[in-house]
Image: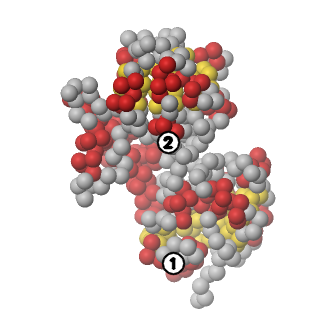
Amino acid sequence: MAPIEVKKICCIGAGYVGGPTCAVIPHIQVTIVDLNQQRIDAWNSDELPIYEPGLDEVVKKARGKNLFFSTDVDKGIEEADLIFVSVNTPTKKSGIGAGFAADLKFLQLATRRIAEVAKSSKIVVEKSTVPCRTADAMRTILEANSKPGCHFDILSNPEFLAEGTAIEDLFAPDRVLIGSLQTQQGLDACAALAGVYANWVPRERILTVGLWSSELSKLAANAMLAQRISSVNALSAICEATGANIDEVAYAVGKDTRMGSKFLKASVGFGGSCFQKDILNLVYLSESLHLPEVAKYWRAVVEMNEYQKSRFANKVVDTLFNTITGKKIAILGWAFKKDTGDTRESPAITLANHFLTEKARINIYDPQVSKDQIWLDLTDYGDIPAEPIKPHVTISQSVEEACHNAEAIVICTEWDEFKTLDWQKIYDNCPRPAFVFDGRLILDRKALTDIGFKVTSIGTGDRL
């Protein structure tokens, strides 16, 4: 049988994964489709809908040549040999598994659309993060709704990119993982997708495994990375109580070649669209498989993350003489990490809500997050009324504006610009005593203390 040749690719979903992932594919025609006209218009404009270093250059170089963005979903499906399904799979908010299980509504709708529209055989690839054995449900939907003579091969190809370094990760990935059924047809489809990646990824970095192993590997990778963060954050609490320094402890631990130093940076907590969602998904999977001890283990990773955010927020209140009512607090950083505009599950949101509950006045600054997005986060996308909190919230256009007359400055995102601020100038415009709370361990504590600030850092006790 001749190898399957992929000439045209369609990606359903123009979000954080679909857009950057498909933008780096060379030579092959790629059409990214989405029903959201505003989002597609943004991808076709000079103001892309997401911020990612290097993404602008990559998109503008390929757009109109081999990269296209469209709302014509049906045409994209019809013309493609291979279809990436890269739709949102958020945590369910209601029904069975609410708060833990992934909501696969959009994935199932996309799968049904493929079956209804396709007039020829296709390779369908899971790009979205999904629970183990989701491909079974996709296959059932495809086979039940397909036209005579149409055959669908399903692959799992999870994305391991990190926001902030996504373009670097896509051009030079640690690995590309492709999962397939171990039938001849499944292996042929796997080889076809591997051939697409081989245009720029060395063959030895393209890993081919079973379908279910691939689906579970994505959840496992994110869960284990988050576990490291929660582990070092748990140690940071011990450091604060004993006078140890978490940076020094993490450095010593990271020098062990069995451990390594990555993801051992203590902070106010992890955020983003993947870590918490994927761990909760793993918890639900474990419970559904009657493995309560396994579920309890992974749930503890999320509980520690929530504890870290709550502990840091309470420390701000305690340090400000046990009340922040009416006090101005500057929140520097709203994105969940630097070099991205993504705010999903950002610790800054949790802290802001805590401070608002205490009736503080908060001033927020982030170099990449829009005012509209901040308000969406503060109101939980409309579920919380904005009017009661509007008098207590100001969104600033600069650090200096946010910090002017602030009784406390709270670092929530590790943006590089926060490391090189004119802290003397900021101090001169703050009431005394002036407090800084470093939730990302990026500031020179001694330099700020010498200026006159009272500095509290994650994982650093006051004992000598």
**Is there CB contact under 8 Å for labels 2 and 1?**
no
* Image mark for residue 33: none
Q: Please state the horizontal and vertical placement of residue 263, each as a whole percent of the image.
A: 37, 48
Residue nearer the viewer, 406 or 72: 406
Residue nearer the viewer, 168 or 144: 168
* Image mark for residue 187: 1
Mark with earlier residue (2, 1): 1
Residue at 54%, 56% in the rendered image: 166
Residue 252 as seen in the image, left or right of residue 36? left
Q: Residue furthest bottom?
A: 1
Q: For the N terminus, give its image quadrant.
A: bottom right
Q: Please state the horizontal and vertical placement of residue 422, each as a whole percent of the image.
A: 50, 30
At label 1, the amino acid type is: Leu
Residue nearer the viewer, 136 or 461: 461
Image quarter of residue 238:
top left
Residue at 63%, 56% in the rendered image: 55
Q: Residues within 10 Å of mark 2 (few under 14, many from 20)?
A: few
Image quarter of residue 380:
top right
The reply to whether residue 362 is visible in this rendering is: no
At label 2, the amino acid type is: Asp
Q: Name the residue beneath numbered marker 2.
A: 416
Q: SS of the residue at dot 2? A: helix
Q: Please state the horizontal and vertical placement of residue 398, each as a whole percent of the image.
A: 60, 30
Residue at 36%, 43% in the rendered image: 265
